[in-house]
């Protein structure tokens, strides 16, 4: 098998939801399946009027596929209508958008990605106008759902599942190309789905489009290890540096160039200390950074970089970083869990699964980011499947240095995660492994709180806090995000703090959020000389606050 398949990717046009978000408005009232805007429709028509695209791309396509989300269908229909072309369009649920903004696998599907059943799609005006073109045979019949949510609306798809979904789709394209001689395929779909398929960081709206050349043969192992989401190399990546020791360093990406460089050099120092394990460098999808291989060559030899360093060039979030690193290690490891299997892997390796030691992974990021990153590891199905044992190895600031202002409020990210019981459990399991990092995060949050100039009066603060406590944990977290100063403000006749009030209500989750994410002190006494522990009879909460006061303060 040789040759390549040309894959043309057409992202949907601008939508009403994206336009609303650009104006700072909430578009969730649209409820589902974000429709094309007037601008998006015009963008699609412009592409359909592009003579070169119509003749050289669409007219020469052996196969056209489209996502079942209505914005993609409307884009495809408008392109065909303007072009006059009438190819068969196979509507494939494998091209549905990935739920990137709700990626933890147990929250509601992002409203823009909630689809419509086949019967409803077939009644759309854009579909009925070209009914002879659209083939919905790959969708379940009638009113059945094909999108990533159950009857309860919860999306249980995580990053690792999306990665392998892209791999299976690419493998099927290769199979079809070889079986029937496909040379060019046109896909109408979505940016995050296209990221997984190609590794590219961004895709513009029409009239622009992208072309990806997909090798039909998986390449032989080489020393080049730059892996992309969905790249064929990942399914059969080189094992030159893998010696069975199951040790790796994972460097999380960062949008700040100086911070990214700091992490890389810290990882290089760890690489020297730890007898040269594999070194996985994760990106943020930002092409503005210096080449990480060039940065690493300042501290390592060219041979070491060539042999031991793996670069993920397309993941764009911390969650994505963690699961992509796990996927890379899984591709190197023949004893991974069946749920992490490459579609190209044979059955022979399955017999040895579960028998090997866990991977020892040194996780490199900065201190204030580490608590959130480690929790994401604990929550990652990919990490669990491969049994990664992750140790925090944060890079430190030198004396006199401080993080830029945008990183100070990082506790808000952690606070949001702690609405989830599973995250709370993970934090209680792992916080003792990252005490210096938790202290750094708390220091930043104190600095951020001190810099706030708009402050609510203590009397009003107490009234708002009591009201929020009556409404639930989410209401309290929302109040603290709006008025972080309430977490550190003495209130009421006894001069008690938010932690005192939350402890008196027996709200362990809120106490955990206040201590870890908002830097409140369990040893803080009010005007009566009492600590938060003295206001609760919950022995588990008392023991936790006592330990936190001893270790963190």
Image (tube, helix red, strand yellow):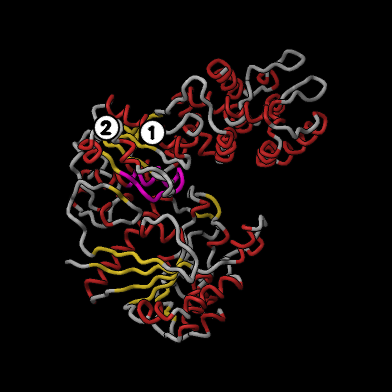
For label 1, the crowd category at 10 Å Cα-Cα, with few meaning under 14, some 14 to 19 and many 20 or more, is: many
- Residue 460 visible, this orientation: yes
Q: Of circles 1 and 2, which is in front?
A: 2
Visible in this render: residue 359?
no
Residue located 48% across and 85% down the image: 131
Residue most extreme to the top: 529
Mark 1 highlights which residue? 363
For mark 1, give the secondary structure.
strand
Query: Quarter holding the C terminus?
Result: top right
Name the residue located 33 percent from the left edge and 50 percent from the top edge: 339
Residue 430, position in %: x, y? Answer: 46, 29
Quadrant showing the N terminus: bottom left
Residue 315 falls inside the magenta stretch? yes
**Residue 6, percent across and down?**
30, 69
Viewer-nearest residue: 389 or 249: 249
Residue 238: image x %, image y %? 20, 47
**Which residues fall within the magenta stretch?**
311-327
Instruction: Name the mark on residue 241.
Output: none
* Residue identified by numbered label 2: 300
Could you tell me how far apart the alpha carbons at marks 1 and 2 are, in whole angstroms? 19 Å
Image position of 411 with respect to 201: above or below:
above
* Mark 1 and mark 2 residues within 8 Å of each other at the beta carbon: no
Q: In the rendered image of this protein, does residue 537 appear above or below residue 311?
A: above
Between 541 and 115, the one nearer to me in the picture: 115
Q: Which residue is drawn at 56% across and 22% down?
A: 544
Magenta segment includes 476: no
Q: Please, is residue 505 above or below residue 127 in the view?
A: above
Q: Where is residue 405 in the image (x, y as percent from the top left)?
A: 59, 34
Other residues around mark 2 within 10 Å, as few (<14) / some (14–19) / many (≥20): some
């Amino acid at each position: 098998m040789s040759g390549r398949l040309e894959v043309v990717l057409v992202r949907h046009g601008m939508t009403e939801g994206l336009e609303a978000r650009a104006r700072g408005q909430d578009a969730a009232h649209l409820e589902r399946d974000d429709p094309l805007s007037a601008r998006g429709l015009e963008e699609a028509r412009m592409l359909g009027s592009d003579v070169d695209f119509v003749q050289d791309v669409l007219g020469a396509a052996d196969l056209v596929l489209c996502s079942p989300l209505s914005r993609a269908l409307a884009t495809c229909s408008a392109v065909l209508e303007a072009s006059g072309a009438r190819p068969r369009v196979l509507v494939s649920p494998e091209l549905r958008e990935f739920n990137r903004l709700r990626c933890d696998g147990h929250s509601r599907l992002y409203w823009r990605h909630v689809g419509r059943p086949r019967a409803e799609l077939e009644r759309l005006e854009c579909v009925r106008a070209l009914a002879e073109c659209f083939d919905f045979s790959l969708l379940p019949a009638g009113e059945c759902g094909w999108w990533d949510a159950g009857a309860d609306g919860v999306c249980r798809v995580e990053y690792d599942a999306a990665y392998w979904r892209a791999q299976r789709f690419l493998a099927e394209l290769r199979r079809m190309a070889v079986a029937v001689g496909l040379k060019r395929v046109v896909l109408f779909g979505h940016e995050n789905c296209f990221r997984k398929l190609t590794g590219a960081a961004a895709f513009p709206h029409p009239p622009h489009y992208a072309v990806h050349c997909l090798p039909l043969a998986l390449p032989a192992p080489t020393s080049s290890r730059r892996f992309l989401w969905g790249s064929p190399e990942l399914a059969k990546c080189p094992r030159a540096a893998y010696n069975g020791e199951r040790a790796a360093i994972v460097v999380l990406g960062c949008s700040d160039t100086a911070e990214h460089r700091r992490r890389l050099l810290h990882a290089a120092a760890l690489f020297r200390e730890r007898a040269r394990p594999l070194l996985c460098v994760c990106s943020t999808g930002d092409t503005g950074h210096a080449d990480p291989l060039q940065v690493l060559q300042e501290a390592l030899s060219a041979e070491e970089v060539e042999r031991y360093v793996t670069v993920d060039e397309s993941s764009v979030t911390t969650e994505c970083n963690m699961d992509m690193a796990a996927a890379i290690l899984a591709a190197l490891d023949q004893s991974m869990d069946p749920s992490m299997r490459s579609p190209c892997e044979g059955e022979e390796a399955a017999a040895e699964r579960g028998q090997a030691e866990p991977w020892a992974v040194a996780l490199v990021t900065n201190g204030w980011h580490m608590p959130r990153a480690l929790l994401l590891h604990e929550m990652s199905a990919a990490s669990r499947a491969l049994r990664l044992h992750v140790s925090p190895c944060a890079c430190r600031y030198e004396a006199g240095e401080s993080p830029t202002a945008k990183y100070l409020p990082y506790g808000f990210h952690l606070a949001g995660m702690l609405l989830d019981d599973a995250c709370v459990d993970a934090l209680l399991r792992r916080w003792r492994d990252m005490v210096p990092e938790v202290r750094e995060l708390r220091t930043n949050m104190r600095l951020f709180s001190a810099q706030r100039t708009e402050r609510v009066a203590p009397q009003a603060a107490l009234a708002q806090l009591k009201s929020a406590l009556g409404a639930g944990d989410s209401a309290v977290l929302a109040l603290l995000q709006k008025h972080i100063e309430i977490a550190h403000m003495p209130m009421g006749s006894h001069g008690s703090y938010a932690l005192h009030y939350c402890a008196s209500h027996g709200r362990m989750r809120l106490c955990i959020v206040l201590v870890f994410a908002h830097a409140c002190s369990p040893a803080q006494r009010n005007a009566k000389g009492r600590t938060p522990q003295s206001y609760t009879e919950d022995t588990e909460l008392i023991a936790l606050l006592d330990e936190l006061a001893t270790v963190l303060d």
